[in-house]
Image (cartoon, helix red, strand yellow):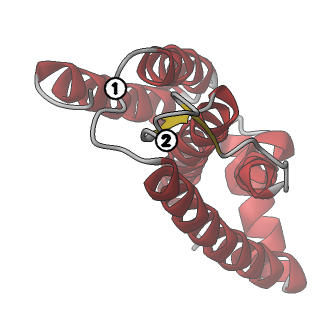
Amino acid sequence: MYKGLWCVILYSLALVMLLSGAYWHVNCTVYVMAGLFFGWDIWFVGGEHFEGRTTTKILSHCRDAETLMSYFIGFYAAVLAVVFTDTGKTTTFLKACHQAHLSMCFVGAPLVLAAIPMLFIPVEFGKKKDEAAHQKEDITRSVKALMFVNIYFEKLVVFTFVHDLLRISMALVKLSEW
């Protein structure tokens, strides 16, 4: 489960990778963390970490995550709209991105990645363990897959957004125009 020393290690590594990527102006830290997040979430969803969880709670968590990502999309789109509607800000922003060696693909990545969990994909909610006994419902693989997509992309969006923000901020400090 998400507790103990493993969480501290993952958060510490994420912080080190964020700072390293910003300092050295590299994208490889995002790729490394994307792989680690993927493995971590596969381990979580594939294991027996669902004790005390129900399909209803998981779907509620997924809806909450989708709601947060929709707010993020609106916020991020508004920030980009402000930056790209003023010629002076656009020029400064593009100079900062160039100084930070940050491509427009990476700038747009959080916006695109945030939309993926919001795609509507019908899932099988649950199956009875024993039809005759009408026991508690099993959590299906499709519900686990839905949860994986939500938790993975939520982490990836936040990490990529902060990575971009740190790199652009450091470049702006060097340019000292903002």
- Where does label 1 land, which residue? 49
| For residue 20, above or below residue 172 | above
| For residue 165, above or below residue 30 | below
Residue 60: image location, x then y, percent? 51, 63
Please indicate whether residue 106 sits to the left or right of residue 60 in the image: right
Q: Is residue 176 visible?
A: no
Taking the spot 29% from the left edge, 33% from the top edge, the residue there is 51
Taking the spot 26% from the left edge, 31% from the top edge, the residue there is 2
Label 1 sits on a secondary structure element that is loop
Q: Is residue 3 visible?
A: yes
- In the image, which disc is placed on residue 134? 2
Please tell me which of labels 2 and 1 falls first in the chain: 1
Residue situated furthest front in the rendering: 132
Please indicate whether residue 160 sits to the left or right of residue 87 in the image: left
Disc 1: CA contacts within 10 A as few (<14), some (14-19) or many (>=20) = few
Amino acid at circle 1: His
- Decide which of 75, 61 is in the foreground and name it: 61
Q: Nearer the viewer, mark 2 or mark 1?
A: 2
Taking the spot 82% from the left edge, 80% from the top edge, the residue there is 81
Please indicate whether residue 112 sits to the left or right of residue 66 in the image: right
Q: Quadrant of residue 8?
A: top left
Q: Where does the N terminus fall, quadrant-wise? A: top left
